[in-house]
Image (cartoon, rainbow, N blue to C red):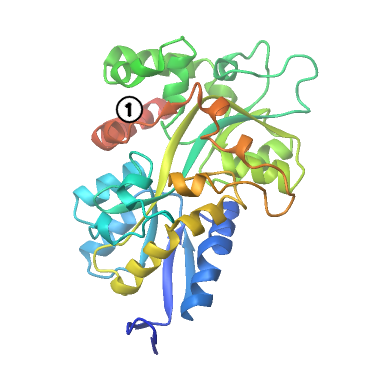
């Protein structure tokens, strides 16, 4: 069944399929993008969930059987997918300006726009801990992850080399600006994996982004890596005793892209323009503690929709949180991803 949009003259399928991450993040998108877009156009949004990566996208494009209209990607995946011809290019000029007329390319934060994707939010992979687990000394820095003597207990870490290698080098006091140069050498990787060796038997690996907060809440682990918005949701919305460490947060962008061969390309472009407007990005930050990818939207962030608390101290981009942040080097990950995964998989099997 087709639905024609009276105001735009576009005829499109009445359902737009968006591949995204589920959980608190998807709920924030529903409030900020999906429901308002449906109210404006009459087009229903159907979502599917995944845990990242581009393997399935590559297979669908290869088989000329793409199931998604829009896909939410981390930046390194968006770069790899674009380089492999899996995404449609998006021109900056077709994106809406800021309310004061500032062109989109000048309003989005540096790095938020790529040839094939448009930034939504700045999120961070952070460490969090169970506040009940430590009565005297509480973790304050990323090196505490590797200190089993002062902070005994299981750790939940993502089954990926992302973040944990950077944190391992920071625990040696390697300066932030030198981390990726050192990780590009065998010596740097050896140092990082040697640090991880010390806690390997204490690690519970996770793949689903909802798992770290659950493991902390159930007392199965005392520390966990995870997305700052998930920990915020667990602590503020669910009242769980989870505290976030901002030391060495690894920040990244989440971006919207349109797969090559998407069933409803024109409508997907309209949705991307709508979702990445100043108003909608600022609206999303009322529901989850991710920083909007546009400066004009960041200026409009204030209160949490459910509790009324000030959202700014909970954002990765809040200045005190940002002081010791690590900018994820997307080009480095895109360039070294396959080799890094092989080294990580070999280490897991040792």
Residue 116 in the image, given as x and y percentages of width and height: 26, 53
Q: Residue at x 51, y 45 (%)?
A: 298
Q: Residue at x 47, y 25 (%)?
A: 325
Is residue 149 shown above or below 135? above
Residue 315 in the image, given as x and y percentages of width and height: 57, 38
Dot 1 crowding, Cα within 10 Å, few <14, some 14–19, many 20+: few
Residue 174 in the image, given as x and y percentages of width and height: 41, 11
The answer, for residue 242, to whether it is visible in the render is yes
* Side (left or right) of 97 relative to 126: left
Residue 148 in the image, given as x and y percentages of width and height: 63, 14
Quarter of the rendering occupied by the C terminus: top left
* Side (left or right) of 238 relative to 226: right
Secondary structure beneath dot 1 equals: helix
Where is residue 189, by image quadrant? top left
Q: Which residue is drawn at 52% across and 15% down?
A: 198
**Residue matched to label 1:** 343
* Side (left or right) of 196 relative to 334: right
Quarter of the rendering occupied by the N terminus: bottom left
């Amino acid at each position: 069944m087709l639905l024609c949009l009276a105001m735009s003259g576009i005829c499109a399928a009445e359902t737009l399929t968006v591949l995204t991450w589920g959980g608190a993040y998807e709920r924030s998108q529903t409030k900020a993008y999906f429901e308002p877009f449906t109210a404006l156009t009459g087009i229903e949004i159907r979502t599917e969930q995944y845990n990242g990566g581009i393997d399935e996208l590559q297979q669908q494009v290869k088989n000329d059987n793409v199931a998604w209209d829009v896909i939410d990607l981390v930046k390194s995946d968006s770069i790899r997918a674009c380089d492999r011809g899996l995404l449609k290019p998006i021109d900056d000029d077709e994106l809406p300006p800021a309310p004061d007329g500032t062109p989109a390319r000048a309003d989005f934060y540096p790095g938020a726009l790529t040839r094939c994707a448009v930034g939504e939010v700045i999120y961070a992979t952070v460490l969090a801990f169970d506040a009940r687990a430590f009565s005297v000394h509480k973790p304050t820095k990323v090196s505490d992850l590797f200190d089993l003597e002062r902070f005994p207990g299981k750790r939940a870490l993502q089954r990926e080399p992302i973040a944990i290698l950077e944190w391992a080098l920071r625990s040696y006091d390697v300066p932030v600006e030198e981390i990726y140069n050192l990780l590009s050498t065998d010596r740097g990787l050896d140092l990082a994996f040697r640090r991880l060796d010390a806690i390997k038997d204490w690690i519970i690996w996770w793949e689903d982004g909802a798992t770290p907060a659950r493991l902390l809440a159930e007392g199965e682990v005392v520390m966990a890596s995870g997305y700052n918005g998930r920990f915020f949701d667990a602590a503020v919305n669910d009242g769980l005793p989870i505290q976030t460490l901002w030391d060495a947060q690894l920040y990244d962008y989440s971006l919207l892209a349109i797969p090559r061969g998407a069933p409803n390309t024109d409508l997907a472009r309209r949705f991307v323009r709508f979702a990445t407007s100043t108003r909608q990005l600022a609206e999303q930050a009322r529901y989850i503690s991710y920083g909007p990818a546009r400066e004009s939207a960041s200026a409009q962030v204030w209160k949490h929709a459910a509790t009324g608390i000030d959202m700014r101290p909970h954002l990765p981009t809040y200045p005190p949180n940002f002081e010791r942040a690590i900018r994820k080097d997307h080009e480095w990950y895109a360039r070294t991803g396959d080799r890094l995964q092989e080294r990580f998989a070999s280490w897991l099997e040792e």
